[in-house]
Amino acid sequence: MSSDETAHRGDPPSAVSPEYPAGAQPAPGWNPPGYPPPGYGQPAYGHPGFPPAGYGSQGYAPQGHGPQGYGPPGYPPPYGRSTNIMAVLALVMAFTFAPAGLVLGIVARRQIRRTGEEGNGLALAGIIVGGIMTAIFVLFIVLWIVAFAAFSGSGSFGP
């Protein structure tokens, strides 16, 4: 039994390696497996509380103090300008009842210019969508009247 078998964890390895017979030496530059090369070791570090020699203070907080606490809570940010309700209604009505959306959009843009509220884009969208939908609705009614007039002039509505 070698001296390494009786060693405890953390003990340094024994000076005599069991891999070599008595009097045998390893080839120069060769190290046995598991052993670091000669001159290799952990780098030396200075004391963690002091900067290296020759360097000034690097802006660290004094040692021995914990992190600083938070200050009192601040005030909430001020609210921005409110959105014009008529501009929101203009966009909603442009999809449900297009002529009302068109009219509400025009009125909302006038109010926004006067009061400085938000919602100019909503009012403009209400005008555009309301105008397009109203034009399509008017075109549909005109085509329906023309078709009704064409069928009524011939005198026959059935087979």
Image (spheres, rainbow, N blue to C red):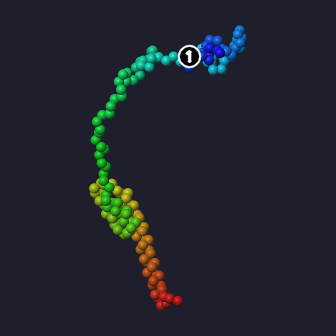
Q: How many marks?
A: 1
Left or right: 118, with 52 as reference point: left
Q: Nearer the viewer, residue 66 or 24?
A: 24
Residue located 31% across and 63% down the image:
107
**Whether residue 41 can be seen here:** no
Q: Is residue 113 above or below residue 6?
A: below
- Give percent across and percent down for residue 151: 48, 86
Residue located 55% across and 18% down the image:
10
Residue located 29% across and 46% down the image:
78
Q: Is residue 69 above or below residue 56?
A: below
When asked about the image quadrant of residue 19, the answer is top right
Left or right: 139, with 41 as reference point: left
Left or right: 26, with 132 as reference point: right
- Give percent across and percent down for residue 36: 61, 18
Q: Amino acid at mark 1?
A: Asp
**Whether residue 3 can be seen here:** yes
- Give percent across and percent down for residue 109: 33, 60
Which residue extends farthest front? 1
Work out which quarter of the rendered image holds the N terminus and state it: top right
When asked about the image quadrant of residue 83, the answer is bottom left
Q: Nearer the viewer, residue 51 or 19?
A: 19
Q: Is residue 16 above or below residue 89?
A: above
Q: Is residue 18 above or below residue 107?
A: above
Q: Which residue in the structure is indicated by mark 1?
A: 11
- Give percent across and percent down for residue 3: 62, 14
